[in-house]
Amino acid sequence: MGFVRLEVQRLLKAYKTNDPLTIAAQKNITVLYEVLGHNTWGYFSCMNRIPIIHVNNKLGEFETRFTIAHELGHRILHPKLNTPFLRRNTLFSVDRIERQTNRFAIYLLIGHEQPDIGESVGSFLSRCGIPEEMYNFYS
Ligand SMILES: [Zn+2]
């Protein structure tokens, strides 16, 4: 199991939930819903050592959870890095850090769900509520 999946397993065990909002709250990370325009889904900031996840308040339910999971991923996987805004087109980014963080978010949102015997990847991910454009982060 790779580094990203191990980190997700560790989180699921420590917080006994895969809900990114609950995990953020328990890590004392504030989540703020803001007007961020059409393309930006969210970003992470840390001012005066107060960590904040900023989320576009126009996103749908899945995108909101995905954005919080993604920014939480940066905080856990890359605490020393300054990370860019999460934008719609970041989903197709080839940047290693962004791809890694998208994988983290997908595995967190899947949580403890497992594919049934003989179940296709597509059927499994759709059952977990993952949109098709994100299937390639499950690998
Ligand atoms: Zn990112």
Image: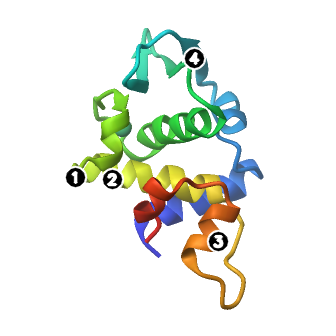
Residue 1 picture location, percent across and down: 47, 76
Q: Is residue 120 above or below residue 8?
A: below
The answer as to whether callout 3 falls within 8 Å of ligand 1 is no
For the point 37% across and 35% down, the residue is 88
Q: Position of residue 99 (x, y in %)?
A: 33, 53
Residue tagged by mark 2? Answer: 99
C-beta proximity under 8 Å, tags 2 and 1: yes
Closest to the observer, 27 or 74:
74
Please state the quadrant of the image where ligand 1 appears.
top left
Instruction: Kindly identify the amino acid type of the residue bearing the numbered disc 1.
Output: Val
Q: CA distance from mark 2 to mark 1?
A: 7 Å
Query: Of callouts 4 and 2, which one flags the residue occurring earlier in the amino acid sequence?
Result: 4
The alpha-carbon separation of the residues under discs 4 and 2 comes to 24 Å
User: Mark 4–mark 3 contact, CB under 8 Å?
Assistant: no
Residue 56 percent location from the top left of the image: 51, 20
Classed neighbour count for the residue bearing mark 3: other residues with Cα under 10 Å, few (<14), some (14–19), many (≥20): some
Q: Which residue is rendered at x = 42% and y = 50% of the image?
A: 102
Task: Give neighbour class at mark 1: few <14, some 14-19, many 20+ (Cα, 10 Å).
Answer: few
| Residue type of the residue flagged with mark 4 | Asn
Disc on res. 94: 1
In this rendering, the answer to whether 87 lies above or below 1 is above
Image quarter hosting the C terminus: bottom left
Q: Disc 3 marks which amino acid?
A: Phe
Point out the frontmost of discs 4 and 2: 4
Residue at image mark 3: 124
Q: Which circle's residue, 4 or 3, is located before the other in the chain?
A: 4
